[in-house]
Amino acid sequence: MYQNKTILQYFQQLANDKNGCENVVKYFLNRIEAFKHLNAFIEVYTEESIQRAKALDTKRNNGESLGKLHGVIVALKDVICYKGHKISAASNILKDFTSVYSSTAVEKLLAEDAIIIGNCNCDEFAMGSTNENSAYGKVLNTLDETKVPGGSSGGSAVAAQAGLCMISLGSDTGGSVRQPADFCGIIGLKPTYGRISRHGLIAYASSFDQIGIFGNNIEDVALVLEIISGADEYDSTVSNKKLEKFNASSHNNSKYKFAYFKNALDHPSLDQDIKKNIEDLIKKLSADGHEVKGINFELLDYIVPAYYVLATAEASSNLSRYDGVRFGKRETSGTDLTDMYTKTRTKGFGKEVKRRIMLGTFVLSSGYYEAYFTKAQQIRRLLVNQTEKIFKDFDAILIPTVPATALSIGAMEKDPVATYLADIYTVFANLTGIPAISIPLFKHSNNMPFGVQIMSDKYNEVTLLQISDRILRDHKTA
Ligand code: GLN
């Protein structure tokens, strides 16, 4: 009934339905209940969203002016603060912690009449690629429940995939929106670093973190981006650069210049079926009259190591605040302050988070700082320089999102390094700050979906969305 519609189509439907918002909330609440076993949600705000829907219906029936997201059902990743609601980053250390303020993104959604229906499961502190590192357990991929949905925003991805909301928000530090979008067959956008305020987003790696958007069509993703982006007095890294308006028909005849990385497509880790489909897409885009050129990106193999040095270094610093004193759980059995810290952190954090805190602390330690942290910063600078050069000649870069389709549950548990290496195509956009999107185009011979990743120059999300819209319309094969 309300599924597979764009927000605009939903608005048309609402115009003739006096209790439309209430009906739609109940419809989604029923679906959430019916798909409970997917474990996508941590908490569902049942009563509250029904009350809000009723208030919105009254507002509409009274002829008052309506917000741009009037009655739109949104789900949040459990790292995005919503005042008065629990937030834990899917960690035991923050279980039962309640947000004392709302993130800027949430404030903006609410100001435009959105209905926030609940918060979604994810990897602990957004560290992971499968959603298996969660204090609330794993999330299932609706298309095949023996497979992971990806991570770290796995719950948000499944909420959008299974039609449990209209739009969901995740966070993307190294691919956590694009990778699960790819595994789930939906759209996942990571905007430019500095497009959306990080105020109220629980920090993992502050120079990479960005809120991202999951949706089932480009138009909706563009609308939500327009609403939640923009300068914010609480986050000095947000730019006040204008976001152009997305217009679905304005680019029907545009011809674009695409670059693709030849060595990314030849990478030994890339699945052959994915490779072939992306090569075919490249041919089709050329045939459509776009300019598509293969280039070699020499720094490809340095991307993952640089990301894991820098992200874990930042994480070790960001997570030092969870010591049992100010936030979340405290182990009271400690004999002195240090013992209390140790016990709290030992009990509160999961295995992967501990691994990353240790790795990050190590790369920052005196004696190793120059060899790891400084080196990785130098690589980051080279990547930024090379990327700037590429965008002097091209509108967009085409690259796979992930080297493989959704993995079986448990498949990666024993090999964290293999899991890290699978981030090869996504962490590039976070290291350089450029916007990137994963769009669902294909079906693998194993029946799982996958897409292509497109990146554009900084603050050029509208070109990115227009290109994505065109490619989805012209070349979606599944
Ligand atoms: N897989 C990446 C990691 O584990 C992505 C994390 C993210 O984007 N939050 O760090």
Image (tube, helix red, strand yellow):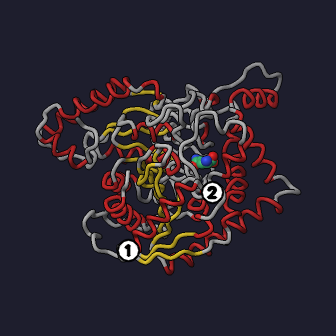
Query: Disc 1, ligand 1: is the CB inside 8 Å?
Result: no
Is 321 situated above or below 146?
A: below
Residue 287 seen in the figure: yes
Q: Secondary structure at mark 1?
A: helix
Q: Say whether residue 225 is left or right of residue 258.
A: left
Please tell me which residue is depicted at 66% across the width and 46% down the height of the picture: 419
Mark 2 surroundings: few (<14), some (14-19) or many (≥20) residues within 10 A? many
Q: Say whether residue 194 is left or right of residue 222.
A: right
Q: Secondary structure at mark 2?
A: loop
In the figure, residue 13 lies in which quadrant?
top left
Q: Amino acid at mark 2?
A: Ile
User: What is the total number of numbered labels drawn onto the structure image?
Assistant: 2
Pointer 1 residue: 287
Residue 51 seen in the figure: no
Q: Are marks 2 and 1 in contact (CB under 8 Å)?
A: no
Looking at the image, which residue sits at the far right? 367
Q: Which of 8 and 470 lies nearest the eye of the viewer? A: 470
Please tell me which residue is depicted at 56% across the width and 61% down the height of the picture: 429
Work out whether mark 2 precedes mark 1 in sequence or the reverse, and give the earlier one. 1
Q: Say whether residue 200 is left or right of residue 65.
A: right
Is 413 situated above or below 45?
A: below
Pointer 2 residue: 424
Q: Amino acid at mark 1?
A: Ala
Image coordinates for residue 298, horizontal then vertical, percent: 67, 72
Mark 1 surroundings: few (<14), some (14-19) or many (≥20) residues within 10 A? few
In the figure, residue 96 lies in which quadrant?
top right
Q: Which of 245 and 408 lies nearest the eye of the viewer? A: 408
Image coordinates for residue 39, horizontal then vertical, percent: 48, 28
Please tell me which residue is depicted at 48% across the width and 49% down the height of the picture: 444
Image coordinates for residue 243, horizontal then vertical, percent: 37, 65
Cα separation between marks 2 and 1: 29 Å
